[in-house]
Image (cartoon, rainbow, N blue to C red):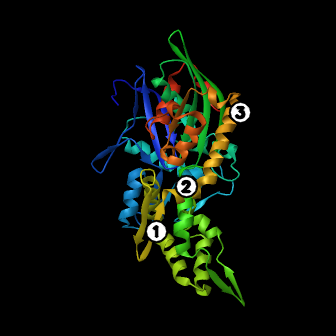
Amino acid sequence: MSSAKPAVSIGVDFGTSNTVVALATSDGKVEAVRFEHGGRTHSVYVSAICFWEERPGSGQPPRAEGGPWAIEQFLEGRTVHRFIQSFKTFAASSAFTTTQIFRQRYKFEDLLAAFLRTLVRHAGGGFDLGAPTVMVGRPVRFAGGNPDEALAMQRYRDAFERLGAGHARYVYEPVGAAFSFTRQLKHDATVLVADFGGGTSDFSVMRFSRQGGVLRAEPLGHAGIGIAGDTFDYRIVDHIVSPKLGKGSLYRSFDKELPIPNHYYSTLARWHQLAMMKGSSDLRELQQLVRTALEPAPLEDFITIVDRDLGFSLYRAVSDTKVALSGSDKVEFRFKQDGIDIGASVTRRKFESWIADDVARLGTTVDAALTKAGIAAKDIEKVFLTGGTSFVPAVQRLFAERFGEKKLTSADQFESIAYGLALIGQTAEPDRWTVAA
């Protein structure tokens, strides 16, 4: 963005899978921050961080890279490293206190601050989080079985404060998406915004109107749930990958044959937990189970995935399969690396049977947003879908059946929230849209 028109508002969409920053200028223009990597220009910064020691044993703090540079460092694998992805999922977890990275312990806010520093650095001075108006997106409901919202927001504030953004305002992510969408509206409308992220899905009902040429928006109701793209990935791992890595097999304990505990496979299927498994007690327990397992080879493959940091490659194979099923009735899943070879045919019908309960719970959460807004589905004039999961046919059908296919619309699945957040920062009353921390 040209330095002749400095940003008057910065929107930060820190997502489970990807992060986008948008800058709004005084003339009303909004533009995403761009990153140059690998000969290409990107507006999306992968929510991953890689730590490594420049000089092992020197006592110096580890170096860190984020986004595509983290993936590059991880794939090159020239030094001992620690690669962490989807760490936003830990934000509201009181069970997560710290993780050991070489000789240092990192809290969630340490990880987030380190990640944001890499993002700002690679933006090449394109923006400063110390700007007067910084709007940060947050889920309506954080991921996890029992999320602690107050803890998550304190962690967010601590991390952003380290980069000079202690004054940042926090806005529900679907509200940001709604503001981006309003630029398409030609008339007053009651809108349902459905924002599907990697870890959570959030829904907001809003009423938009124009008075004297000025856009006015009234939030009517919000609801969220910890089901999204990563949940659908989990189902693929659970049904295809985990059985090939020992799930359902047995080990011998004295004179009894017992099943391998399932919680290892829950960790395998949740990318943020798998990234933390290396060096954990779970990995040591698996190594002990190999000695007494009736079929040790699958467990050895599981250990190899953790020990050699193959989780990212596995994640890509699973995610690619999910995306391909949106356009094909049948897809071949294949993961082949370091002596591990897992393959299977997956039909869309089978995949939809695996996610049926998840889709039903999404529908219940949509109904909760409508109830809080005090309106019926027929009163919704437009449904704005954003996020990659919104392209899953079963999710599309859910909204088409409730609201009618003609009401459905969508926009850029990555940039819309950040754009909307930056636009909110330009309004006369940005505090009106913030969530009490």
Indicate which disc residue 352 carries: 2
Alpha carbons under labels 1 and 3: distance apart = 42 Å
Quarter of the figure with residue 119 = top left
Q: Is residue 250 above or below residue 133?
A: below
Q: Earlier in the sequence, mark 1 or mark 3?
A: 1
Q: Residues within 10 Å of mark 3 (few under 14, many from 20)?
A: some
Residue under label 1: 344
Q: Is residue 310 above or below residue 399?
A: below
Q: Residues within 10 Å of mark 2 (few under 14, many from 20)?
A: some
- Judge from the rendering whether residue 35 lies leftward or rightward of residue 266; answer left or right: left
Quarter of the figure with residue 415 = top left
Tell me the SS state at disc 2.
helix
Callout 2 amino acid: Glu
- Judge from the rendering whether residue 283 lies leftward or rightward of residue 29; answer left or right: right
What is the quadrant of the C terminus in the image?
Answer: top right
Looking at the picture, tell me which residue is in the foreground, 357 or 113: 357
Disc number lying in front (3 or 2):
2
Q: Residues within 10 Å of mark 1 (few under 14, many from 20)?
A: few
Q: Earlier in the sequence, mark 3 or mark 2?
A: 2
Residue under label 3: 371
- Judge from the rendering whether residue 17 lies leftward or rightward of residue 337; answer left or right: right
Q: Position of residue 99 (x, y in %)?
A: 59, 61
Indicate which disc residue 174 carries: none
Looking at the picture, tell me which residue is in the foreground, 338 or 59: 338
Please report the residue visible at 68 percent of the width from the left and 46 percent of the height from the top: 151
